[in-house]
Image (spheres, helix red, strand yellow):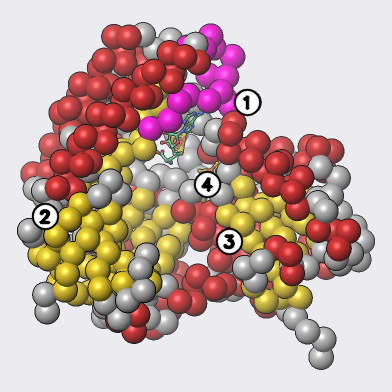
Amino acid sequence: MSAPKKLFVKTYGCQMNVYDSERMTGALEAAGYEATDSPETADMILLNTCHIREKAAEKVYSELGRLKPLKARNPDLKIGVTGCVAQAEGEEIFRRQPAVDLVVGPQAYHRLPQMEAAVRSGQRALDTDFPEEDKFDHLPAARGPRARRAPTAFLTVQEGCDKFCAFCVVPYTRGAEVSRPAERIIAEARDLVERGVAEITLLGQNVNAYHGAGPEGPVTLAALIRQLAAIDGLQRIRFTTSHPNDMSADLIAAHGEVEKLMPYLHLPVQSGSDRILKAMNRKHTADAYLDVIAKVRAARPDIALSGDFIVGFPGETDEDFEATLALCEQVRYAQAYSFKYSARPGTPAAGRTEVPEDVKSERLHRLQALLSRHQADFQESMIGRILPVLLEKPGRLPGQMVGRSPYLQAVHLVADEAAAGQIVPVRITASETNSLSGERVD
Ligand code: SAH
Ligand code: SF4
Ligand code: F3S
C-alpha cells in the first residue's frame, strides 16, 4: 500500500469553521489522507475561510500567494478553498489565484471526497450549492489531531441565519436557518463523551433559534440542553451564538436549573442606539436587550455575559455611539468583541455612506478601553475564589496546564498533563488581561 497522502487544514473565522474543519478532515481521512501540521509536507491544503469582514477575506488571498510556490516543490499538491469566502466568491477565486484547484462552500462538504477524486484526475472542482440533503448525514465523525486529544468539543446543532442584519454576510454564505434533528445531536454527543469529551459547546449562527425535529415535534434549545445534561460523563454544556430575540423563557430558566449548563452567555447586541439597531435591522431595542439580560441575571445571578459590537455603522453619530458606551456601563460584560464596521458586498448596508475611518478608529479605541476595564474588574473579582477548572492542555510553562473556569476564563496552574479532562478545584491567585492563574486545592 502506498503511504497515506497528507492533509493540512488552516481554519479562519468562527467556531463553526473549527467544527467543519474537523468534519472535513474526517471525510478525507476516510478517503486515505492523514492530517499534518505542516503545509510543506502536505499533498492537499485546505483553507477554511471567513468572509465576515474585508480583512478576513483578504487574508485568504495573501495566504494563497504564500502557498503557491509549494506546488513547484510538490507537483502532487492540491490547494482548496472552503468556508464562507468559497461560498461568497466561488469561481472568482480561480480567477484571482489560478493555483487553486478546489472551491467548496459550507453546505457541500459531504461532496468533498468526490471533488478530491476529480482534482486528482487533473480537473478543477467547484461546488457552492445548497443541496437538499443534510451534509452531516454524509460526513464521518469529526477527526483530526485536535478532535482526537481535546476534552472539549464543538457540536453544530443549527446552521444558517434568517435574520438578515443589514451588515452581515452570514445569511448569504451559510444559507437559511436549518436545525439538525435532536436524536442525531444526542448520538453525536454520546460518541464524543465515549471518546473522553467532558465539555460540549453547541454551535449555531443563531443557536437559540434551534428547533430540531424530535419524536414528539420540534425540540427547543432548552429541551435539547436538558436531554444532553442526562448523558453520564458529560460534565459541561455551553452554546453559542445567540440572538436576543430568541432568548426564550425556557432557555433563560435552564440557566438557573441545569447544573451542567455553564454560567456564561454570549449575547451580541451590536449597538446601544435604537436608531442604529433599526438601521441594522436587528429587530430589537436597547431596552429589550437589557430586559433579556435582567431576566437571565435573575435566573443565574453569577452569569458571565459576553457580547459583540460594531462601531461606525453607516449613520452612527457621536450620540449613537455614546448610547453604546452607556449600554456597556449598564451590562458590565465579563468579556466582549468589538469591530469596526466593514462594508460587505451584497449586504443591504454596503451602499450606505460610511463613517470616516479615523472616527471609526477613535470610537473602537474608546469602546475597547471601557470593555477592557470591565473585563479586568470581572477577572479580578475571581481572586481568592475557588473555581472548578476543566483541565484542557499543556500551559505556557513546563509542568503547567491550562483549563477553563465555568465562566470560560483560561486558568493557568501547575498540574500533570495526565489530568487533562478532569475538573479540579483551583484557588485563583492572580488575574491577567485574558487569563487567570491559580493553584489546585484538592
Ligand atoms: N451569528 C452571530 C455572529 C455573527 S458574526 C450573531 O448573530 O451574533 C460575529 C460578529 O461579527 C457579529 O456579531 C458582528 O459583531 C460582527 N460583524 C458581522 N458583520 C460585520 C461587518 N460587516 N463589519 C464588522 N463587524 C461585523
Ligand atoms: Fe449575521 Fe445578524 Fe444573522 Fe447574526 S443574526 S448571523 S449578525 S445576520
Ligand atoms: Fe466567518 Fe462564515 Fe463564521 S463568515 S464568522 S466563517 S459563518
Quarter the C terminus occupies: bottom left
Mark 4: which amino acid? Gly
Residue 37 shown left or right of residue 363 in the figure: right
Give 321 or 294, whichever is nearer the viewer: 321
Residue marked by disc 1: 346
**Which residue does the numbered mark 3 point to in the structure image?**
21
**Dot placed on the residue nearer the N-terminal end, 3 or 2:** 3
| Magenta region, residue range | 338-355
Amino acid marked by disc 3: Ser
Residue 383 badge: 2
Labels 3 and 4: the sequence-earlier one: 4
Q: Secondary structure at mark 2?
A: loop
* Circle nearer the N terminus (4, 1): 4
Which residue does the image show at 83% across and 68% down from the upper left?
Answer: 117
Give the amino acid type for the residue marked by disc 1 in the picture. Answer: Gly
Q: Main secondary structure of the magenta part?
A: loop
